Amino acid sequence: MTQLPTVCFLTGTLNAFAGAERMTAVIANALAARGYRVLILSLWDRASVFPLHPAVEHCALFAHRPSFKRQYVSTVLGIRRFVREHGVEVLVEVDTMLTLFTLPATLGRKVRRISWEHCHFDEDLGRPVRKMARFLAARTCTDIVVLTKRDRMRWMEALRPPCNIVHIPNPLPFPLPNARTSRDTRTVLAVGRLTGAKGFDVLLKAWQQVAQHAPDWKLLIVGEGEEREQLEALCHQLGLEQCVSLPGVHTDIAQTYAQSTIFCLSSRYEGFGLVLIEAMAFGLPIVSTNCDQGPRELLADHEDALMVPVEDETALADALLTLIREPAIAERLATHGKAKARHFAIESIADQWTAILGATP
């Protein structure tokens, strides 16, 4: 007879609306529902903005975010103690950077480590040490989980790792909706952190062109981040205060999708682009930049989205106006997108996680 291993997800904090942390909660919940003993160890802050299955055990090393340079040793020792005391058999690092902590923390212990990469291989997010962390993860973990087939190829080409590189996309964080989205709200939706990577500055410049031809349409940018002030200033500079809204984070994002008409992704780069899958699930026609990794792999131009070059505000505006003016095209894209979204249902993705976690004899 076999039994399921005890699995622990190691992450920064669940008390922030961020993609990797959101997926941690979703996958942890799915595994707990299948009978796994699942723990989540946050490095700081035991609170969670995401709902957790009653069986998921959520703990934290520190009450508040520490200085990891000053408290590196105590962090490593804390992880080691937690793994020992809770009988962790599989430790999932929800960021390859965490290898710098988990490698010394698990030395000499029979703990299988899986590193879960959420950004694409050629992006270090401003942390050059990430390259070293990836190198160490590739040589000391049993598995690296990446979000796209393209990223799997990059890992294989660049590092030739002895471990298993597994492509598992992110799942929809909610059940596939049955209801169709509203087609009469005349709202274009964009979702993401207010950072340079998301290209919302380009979207605002494109919207200035859209507004000249479709003055009764609105742009809704849902998210929060460090570029809020710059984006609000740009919005004022472009005279868009009456047709653009930046309301911050929406706790009921599903309702926001359901009340929108078109979805737009203006990113300069993406690790995966879960918002695209969410938008397709709600039957929203999509305009997206053709940035590498996520969008270029997830979408097919003129089949389930209109794709435009990165940072091309005129092309972005033209594509949005096409969907505004041509409801038949919008409907065709939406229908194909909704069918594609079914491949990302949580049950299908949980099956893939179950396959790599295996069982303990």
Image (cartoon, grey):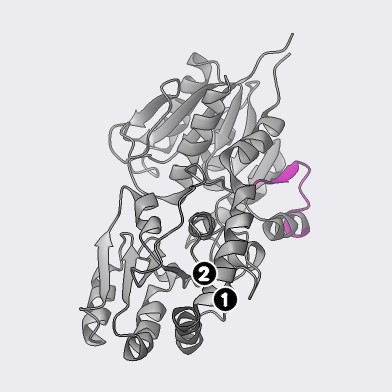
Tell whether label 1 touches label 2 (CB within 8 Å).
yes
- Give the residue drawn at x 40%, y 71%: 196
Residue 294 visible in image = no
Give the secondary structure at mark 1.
strand
- Residue 343 at x, y percent in the picture: 64, 49
Residue 223 lies, with reference to residue 135, above or below; the image says below
Within 10 Å of disc 1 (Cα), the crowding (few <14, some 14-19, many 20+) is many
- Residue 286 at x, y percent in the picture: 51, 69
Q: Does 132 sit left or right of 74 as displayed?
A: right
Say which of 96 and 353 sits in front. 353
The residue under label 1 is 306
Amino acid under disc 1: Leu
Amino acid under disc 2: Ile
Highlighted magenta segment, given as a residue range: 157-169
Residue 73 lies, with reference to residue 88, above or below; the image says below
- Residue 277 at x, y percent in the picture: 54, 56
The residue under label 2 is 286
